Structure formats: C-alpha cells, structure tokens
Image (tube, grey):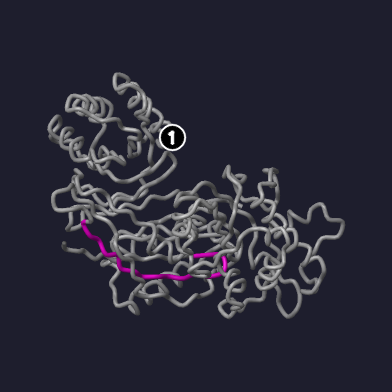
Amino acid sequence: MKTEKIYSAGIDIGTSTTKMVVSSLLLKNVAGLTHVPRIEIIEKTILHQSPIIRTPFINKEVIDMEKIEQFIFQQYELAGIAPADIATGAIIITGESATKQNASEVIHAIANTAGHFLVATAGPDLEGIIAAKGAGTLQQSKNTAKVIANIDIGGGTANIAVMQFGEVIGTCTLHIGGRLIEFHHGVVQSISSPIRKLMETWPDPLSVGDAAEDKRVIRCMEEMVDTLAMTLSGQLTDERHPLLLGHLPNWDKPIDAIMFSGGVAACLYENDCSERQYDDIGEKLAKMLLQHEQLQSFLWLKPQETSRATVTGAGTQTTEISGATIQVNADVLPLKNVPVITCHMDSPLEEVEHVVKTAVERADTLFSIQENRSPFALYFSHLPYLSFQDVHRLCEVILQQLAARSSKEMPIIIVMQSDYAKVIGQTIQALHRTVPIICIDQIKVETGDYIDIGEVLPSGVVPVVVKTLAFHSK
C-alpha cells in the first residue's frame, strides 16, 4: 500500500524563548483492500530542531516580528525545506507573549508567509494540551487507567493538562514561571504583575532593587509551588486567586501521577539549566518543586521532551487526517479558523429540523460580527444509523437552513465522526448542484473548537487542525 509524505512545522513563541521544529508525517491507508479507505499518520519524524533563542521584543509590550520572521526563514533554510512545502502545523504564541500588544498581528503575519497551511493558534488551555502531547503524557495515558497531569512550566505560566485513557479531562493555567522575577547584578530587576498582585496583602512586599537573595523572593516561590500543589490536589477553589489565569481546575478525578515539561523541567529531570542561562528564579523554582512534600505524594513520571515539548507537540501532534470518503469543493480550500457548533442528534430523527435550525441560530448568535454572518462548521454528534430516506431528509433540512446564504466565502461545512460524509455530501450536491460543500468525517470536535482544513492531498484526504483560539489578557 502506497504511503504519502507531508511536511509539518511547529513554532512556539513563548515568554522566555522561541523555538521551531520541522517534521515529516507519513500517511498510509490502514484499512484492508476490501474496506473503506482509512488514511492515518503512521510515522512522525523530526527533521530539524532549531536552537532555542530568547524571544525578541522591541519593548516590554511589543514582540519583534521582523526578528521572529528572520529566525523562522533561517530554520527553513537549515532544514532544506521551502515554506511552500509545509502542508500543516501550528504557530503557538504562549505564556506572557500572548498578552502583548501585537500578539495577534504577529501570529497572523507569520501564518500568511511562513507556510502554505500554517495555523495561527494561541491560548493557555491549548498550549497545555499540545505540551502534554509533545512531552509524551497523552501517549502514556492511553494504556493506563491512571489520571496523569502534565505541568508545562515556562517563563510566565504553568499550563496544566490532565489526561486519562488518551483523552484530555481537564485544564488549568497558573501564573508560575521562571521569569516572573528577574535579576540583574544580584538585585531584583523586574517583578511581574501577578506577583505584585500576590504581594498586595503583604505588609512589606518585595521591590525592584531588593537583593536577589531576599527572603521575600523565596516566599514568592513558596506561594507558587504551594498553589500548584493545591491545584493538583483539588484544593484550589478561589477563582480570584492572584496566580490563577482564567478558569479554575475543571477535571473531576483525583490525579495519580505528574509529569513536568517546559524550560523549568529541564532543570528538574536533567539537572540541565544550560539552555536557560537567564538571571531569574527558574532554577530555584525547579529545586523547590523537587523538595515539596505534597508534590512528592504523586507518582512522578519522566517526559520524552522538556523545554521543547510545546514546539514538538505543535509540529508533530496537532494534525488529524479526515476520512477518505469525503465530499469537498477543492477550490474553497484551505479554510482557516472556522468555529464549530455541535448538532446533537441523540433526539428522534423527526426532530432533525428543530435540532439543525437551533444549532444554526446559535452559531449566528455566537459567531456573527454585527450583521455580518461568518462561516461555521456544523458538527453532527451521536448520529444514529441512517437509512437512505433519513439521509435525504437530513440533507433537505441542512439546505433549507443554509443554501440561501452559501457562497464560496460561506460554504456549507459539515464535520462528523462517523463515516457518512461522502453520502451526505453527495446527496446535498445532488439536491443543490451549485452549493459549495465541505463534508468531512473521522474528526472529533466540540462547540468552542476552531478548525483549519487544508487542501486535498493526493490520497484524497484533507489535513485538519483542531484548536481553541483564545488570546488571553493580563
């Protein structure tokens, strides 16, 4: 059975560091000759890993876009791959960098020039999940009933992703990182705003100019490590906690094992802080994590990647491959940043009109900007067995709701997990010849996800990147 190779890139622009990875993904039809084709990624090979550079800033609030672009194109040259050869992948802007003034501008500028189908994504929850994939936590959790938390600690944030049986069961992000307090010539040079907030109730808070060895620096780190231990033990319930970024922990099972990734983890497992020769609290934070009594009560697992976990995940783990029995208008592709709305089909089929109409109305409310309707994907979940008449009825309802508004800029986009894409897509096309349709299957998404759909590959499938697009604020 023939295989097909595509190239992927991962770029991580973090609080402290920026790095890149170029990979090849090998696709193959894993179904037998007499079965419906099922194309899967059977091999992921990292072709080039960039050096880890310090993230360039013009000033404290503005990322240096020109230097980032120079770095990226230099890495493509070293990898011997042209940006146009890149079929998929992800740019992740993470930690404190995602709060900078031009974060969105940077990521979209790079996405438009650095690869044919390179995705712009950001957000602490997604970062935590991608880091857990790159560190090998997701893979480890596939074969065990253990609940494993991956804690990715970089310069500004600790992104926690909790896994069981290969599924993400919860996330949480904390303001814990190596660069939240920085030093210069033995004195405190900068204190980040979350740490200042943490010290608001202190009678005598730490200030810029205080000695690097000041006891209050230790106290700040103790608060960070205690907060992490409380979070992992299910004891963090204060949604106004100064070190909490976004929502409270949302997993509902006790954690059995923990694994660390990110720059701080390089010090934890390898006693190797050579890649972070920065004047900050990172190394001391790592030692404190190792000695913390409550954290020692968990089973500690070793990651496959530490400082490169996020970029490895972005480059090798973000892409999914659609089913081979799909119906797509190729001239509409690629599509980027398409929001998903779920159409739960667990009610009787007689109610299909109400279910689809409600989902479309909800999508318009959520995703329209003023009076301008935006394209969205309808995800059909819990589809029962469909007879020919059922398929026909469902397609009539979809057209009734969406045909009048469809165009090349607003195609009908349908996603499902079960293998109905071809028959539903072809039936819609037979009922309405001119409507542009993208109907793909073997992809699992949910409301709140965004998807990017790449161009059709020679094997007839499309690469799909599922993501949560959210630039967080300070």
- Residue 404 visible (yes or no): no
- Percent from the top left, x then y, of residue 77? 33, 78
- Percent from the top left, x then y, of residue 307? 52, 70
9 shown above or below 384: below
Q: Residue furthest top?
A: 350
- Percent from the top left, x then y, of residue 221? 73, 64
The range drawn in magenta is 13-29
Which residue carries the number 1 mark?
Answer: 366
- Percent from the top left, x then y, of residue 337? 37, 48
In the rendered image, which quarter contains the N terminus? bottom left
- Residue 387 visible (yes or no): yes
Residue that appears at 45% across and 70% down: 68
Residue that appears at 34% across and 60% down: 118
58 shown above or below 36: below
Count of labels shown?
A: 1
The quarter holding residue 445 reads top left
Compared across the picture, whether 360 is left or right of 55 comes to left
Secondary-structure class at tag 1: helix
Q: Residue furthest right?
A: 203
Check residue 16 for magenta coloring: yes
Compared across the picture, whether 363 is left or right of 228 comes to left
The quarter holding residue 214 reads bottom right
124 shown above or below 329: below
Secondary structure mostly seen in magenta is strand
The quarter holding residue 154 reads bottom right
Residue that appears at 18% across and 24% down: 389
Give the amino acid type for the residue marked by disc 1 in the picture. Leu
Using the image as rendered, state which of residue 280 and residue 272 is in the foreground: 272
Using the image as rendered, state which of residue 359 and residue 40 is in the foreground: 40
